[in-house]
Amino acid sequence: MNDPFEGMMNRFSYQHASSLIHLVLSIILAMMVSRVLSHLVRSVVGETDQSKRWVRRTVFAVWLIFVLDLIGVLDSILDILESLSIPVGMHHITVLRIVQGVLLVMVVSMGSLWCSRLVEKRVMSITSLDTSLRVIVAKIMQGLLITIAVLVTLPVLGIDTTFLSVIGGALGVGLGFGLQKIASNYVSGFIILIDRSVRLDDLITVDGRKGVVTQMEARYAVLKSPDGTEIVVPNENFVTGVVVNHTLNDRMGSLNVSMWLAHEADLRKVIAVLTPLPLNHPDVLNEPHHPAVLVQQVTEIGIEIQLSWWMRDLALVDPNIRPHILLECIEALREAGVPLAKRPEVMVARSQ
C-alpha cells in the first residue's frame, strides 16, 4: 500500500522542479531578449553616450517585465490595461493594444534600421562597383526595408493600409506647398549619384567652400575642409549652382607658391635651386609634369616668380605642404645668396 506522505512529497518535488525549470527558462529568455535589443540599439544609434542610456533603459524594461511575471503581477496589469479603452470614432482602442502597437513599431523599426545598416556595409564593401553606384544601391535597399517594415507592421496593428492613399495625397499637397525644398534636396541627391558629377573623396568647391566629400546622404553632403571643419551642403546646391570638381576626371593637380626677388637676382641660379625642392615630398610627381619655376611679372618692387608642382591626388594633399615648401624655398635662396625683394619706401610729399 502506497504511503500518502510519500505521494505528497513526490507531488511537491515535481511542482518544485517544474517551478525551478520555469524560473531558469524565464531568466534565459530575459537575458536573450535584453541582449538582442541592446545589440539593435547600439547598431542603430551607435556607440555613444545616448546609446548607452537607451541600452540601460531597454535592459531595465525587460527585467522589470520579468520580475512582474515572476511575482505573478504581470497578468493582473495586462487585464487592467485591457479593460481601459479610448474612444476613437465609432471604435474603442484598449490601452493594452496601444502599448503593444508602440512596442511593435519600435522593435520593427530598430530591426529594419539594423538590416539596412548591415546591407549598406555589405554593399559599400564591394570594391568592384563604383562608389556612387554603391551609395545608390545602399539607399534604395534602405528605403525598401523601411517600406516593408511599415507595410508589415500596420496590418498587425489592425490598421487598414488603404489609408496610405489618403496620406500620400496629403503628403503630395504638403510637398507642393511647404516641403518643396526638402523634396528638391532628396531628388537632387539621387541625381548627383546617378550622373556621378560629385562622388565620395572628390575635392570640390561649391558656394565658395572647398573641401573633400566625406559623406553623401539623401538630403545633404558633407565636405571636410583642409582645416578639419565639416561643411553640410544641401544636395540642391550641387544641381542648381556652379560646382568646381577638382578631381572629376583626373585626380592629379598642381599647387604653387609665389615670392618676390630683387632685380639683381640671378634667375637661372634661382631655377636651379628651387626646382628640385618639391621632389623631397613623396606625393609630388616628377613625371609627366616636372616642377617648374616661372617668372610672373617685373615691377618696381622686384621680380615675382612662381614655383609650381603636380600632386598625385589633390584630395589627399597635406594642407601644410605649401607653407613647408615656401619655407624651404626661402632658406635655399638665402643659402645661395639670392636677394629677396624689399618693399620700397613710400615718400609722402608735404604740401607747401
Image (cartoon, grey):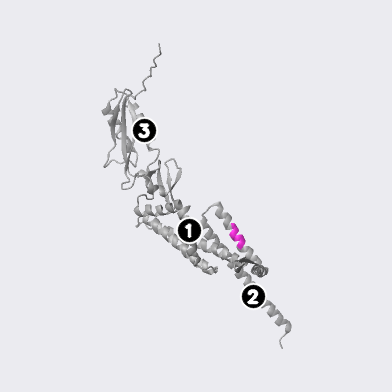
Which residue lies at the image location 48% right of the left edge and 56% below the top edge? 174
Q: Are marks 1 and 3 in contact (CB under 8 Å)?
A: no
Disc 2 residue crowd, few under 14, some 14–19, many 20+, Cα 10 Å = few
Looking at the picture, tell me which residue is in the foreground, 122 or 210: 210
- Magenta-tinted stretch: 56-61
**207 relative position to 93: left or right:** left
> Above or below — where is 97 with respect to 228?
below
Instruction: Specify whether residue 58 is painted magenta.
Output: yes
Three-letter amino acid code at disc 3?
Leu
Mark before the other along the chain sequence, 1 or 2: 2
| Residue 114 appears in the picture as rendered | no
Q: Residue at x 37, y 53 (%)?
A: 191
Quadrant of residue 274 within the rendered picture: top left
Q: In the displayed image of the protein, which residue is found farthest to the top?
A: 352
Q: Which mark is residue 326?
A: 3
Identify the amino acid type marked 1. Leu
Crowding around mark 1 (Cα neighbors within 10 Å: few <14, some 14 to 19, many 20+) is few
Q: Which quadrant: the C terminus? A: top left
> Which residue was labeled with disc 1?
171
State the SS at label 1: helix
